[in-house]
Amino acid sequence: MSFAAPLALIAGTAMNVIGALGEGQQQKGQYEYQAQLALRDQQVAEMQARAAEEKAAYDQQQFQRRAARMQGATRAKLGASGALMSTGAPLAVLGAQAAELALDSSMIGYNGMVAARGYRDQGAMDYAQSKIYEQQGRNAERSSYWKAGSSLLQGFGSAYSSGMFGLGVPKSPGASFPGSGSVQSGIGQSTYRMH
């Protein structure tokens, strides 16, 4: 066997091993990047949830101020008309207006809460996705180790089969292993004899 053949075999095996490990690291890096993006998306979703809550609280405050002015204007009109506001229709009008304004205020708060919950749910899904990406990265790295190990074993197998280690597999009946004798085989019988 020439000197170039073992070198080519060793170089080819080394390239396969390095390639498998490099591919695994590249895939792991891509999954880690995706995980970081998903975590960033989760943080953005949490900020959006807080913003939705703060906006709802602000909108509720502003609405309650407008509602108080509306109720004051209604009382002033009823008072100017000479109606007694503690009984009958004027009391019913003030009560209905107060109930409607309270419901509108509650709806503003509820809509803010629903929006915040939607953002937080999205954030939870983003977080879960980041964990999936991290696991996929670990799996890609492990897979690269298996591929590299397989390449090494195939390289050693090829080296052994080619006789590179001086222990090559006999190719024909009657061929001998170095230093161990010869193998003769016939139909239905095998004999081994030592030199």
Image (tube, grey):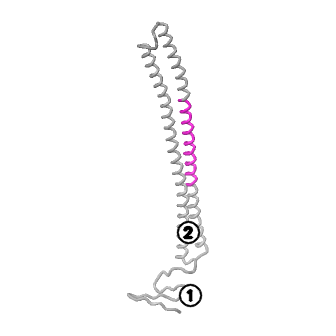
Circles 1, 2 touching at the beta carbon (< 8 Å): no
Res. 179 mark: 1
At x 56%, y 31%, the residue is 54
Image quarter (top left, top right, bottom left or bottom right) of the N terminus: bottom right
Residue 131 at x, y percent in the picture: 53, 51
Quadrant in which residue 53 is drawn: top right
Residue 32, placed above or below residue 80: below
- How would you classify the magenta stretch by its main secondary structure? helix
Instruction: Please tell me whether residue 144 is drawn above or below residue 74 in the rendered image.
Output: below
Q: Amino acid at mark 2?
A: Leu
Against 194, residue 100 (above or below) is above
Q: Residue at x 57, y 49 (%)?
A: 33
Q: Position of residue 69 (x, y in %)?
A: 53, 17
Q: Is residue 38 magenta?
A: yes
- The amino acid type, in three-letter code, at marker 1 is Gly
Closer mark to the observer between disc 1 and disc 2: 2
* Magenta segment: 27-56
Q: How far is the residue under mark 1 from the one under mark 2? A: 27 Å
| 91 horizontally vs 151: left or right | left
Q: Which residue bears the numbered disc 2?
A: 152
Q: Out of 95 and 70, give the one closest to the viewer.
A: 95
98 inside magenta stretch: no
Could you tell which of marks 1 and 2 lies nearer the N-terminus? Answer: 2
Residue at (57% x, 80% y) in the render:
166
